Image (cartoon, helix red, strand yellow):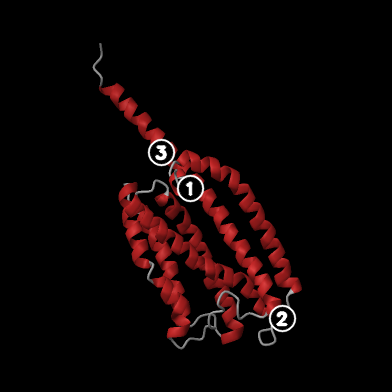
Amino acid sequence: MQTLTQQLANPTRFMDLSARVLPWVAGIAAALIVYGLYLSFFDSPADYQQGETVRIMYIHVPCAWLSMMVYGLIAVSSFGLLVFRHPLADVSAKAAAPIGAAFTFLALLTGSLWGKPMWGTYWVWDARLTSVLILFFLYLGLIALRAAFEDESAGAKLTAVLALVGVTILPIIKFSVNWWNTLHQPSTDFTATVDPSMRWPLLVMALGFTLLFFAMHLKAMRNEVLRRRVKAMRTQAVAGRDRLATQPAE
């Protein structure tokens, strides 16, 4: 009996399944984010030290979480391409990179806005901030490296190698606040140390943003599968015309 991964190795099956799942994932994500925003801005209290600026947390933390999770997904997909030659592994990695870069940029932006009232400056070369900035550059590097190759297969393999090498940044980001003396606050252990009045809105936002990513990722993968199909059909059409042109006239 085939596993789900083996079944989804067939792009046609993936397209059929994703077409059914995508509307549900997108709808649930939208509902959770709307509910989470209501809780974050109207139901949760202001912090006794940070005041109203603490509400940036409800956007910043999910984006920061996704910046690392998405890169982890790219690394797993890259491993699947290089080791198992999974047909959709490269599609997954390529589709996830721009989305991961966007979430990482939002994490840096919201972190800077949060840092100004807390630290008195938008940016410091803090270990956590600097390592996340390196992660953002890694995302841009993956996108640029792939775009530099006309041969998609060669570009995919080199991009996968870079993704696997770059995965070492994830534990550095995670444990930077423990390894070095940084301005950034310690890890919340996935909201375990957050006050209960703020924990629920944060969890709802984190789940909503995670489902939003999966909806965007599925949509991007579908677009990439369709693009490759169109490219393959055009290549076959050009090859057919070339064969006709080279046939001797009777």
Q: Amino acid type of disc 3?
A: Lys
Which of the image's four quarters has the N terminus? top left
Picture layout, residue 245 above or below residue 194: above
Q: Is residue 64 shown left or right of residue 80?
A: right
Percent across and percent down for residue 183 are 51, 86
Which of label 3 and label 1 is nearer to you? 1
Residue at x 32%, y 54% (from the top left corner): 83
Q: Which residue is mark 2?
A: 46
Picture layout, residue 222 above or below residue 67: above
Provide the secondary structure element on which disc 1 rests.
helix
The one nearer the camera, 107 or 82, is 82
Which of the image's four quarters has the C terminus? top left
Q: Is residue 16 shown left or right of residue 85?
A: right
Q: Is residue 125 visible?
A: no
Q: Is residue 199 shown left or right of residue 169?
A: right
Percent across and percent down for residue 47 are 69, 83
| Furthest residue toward top | 250
Q: Which residue is mark 1?
A: 4
> CB under 8 Å between callouts 2 and 3?
no
Q: Amino acid type of disc 1?
A: Leu
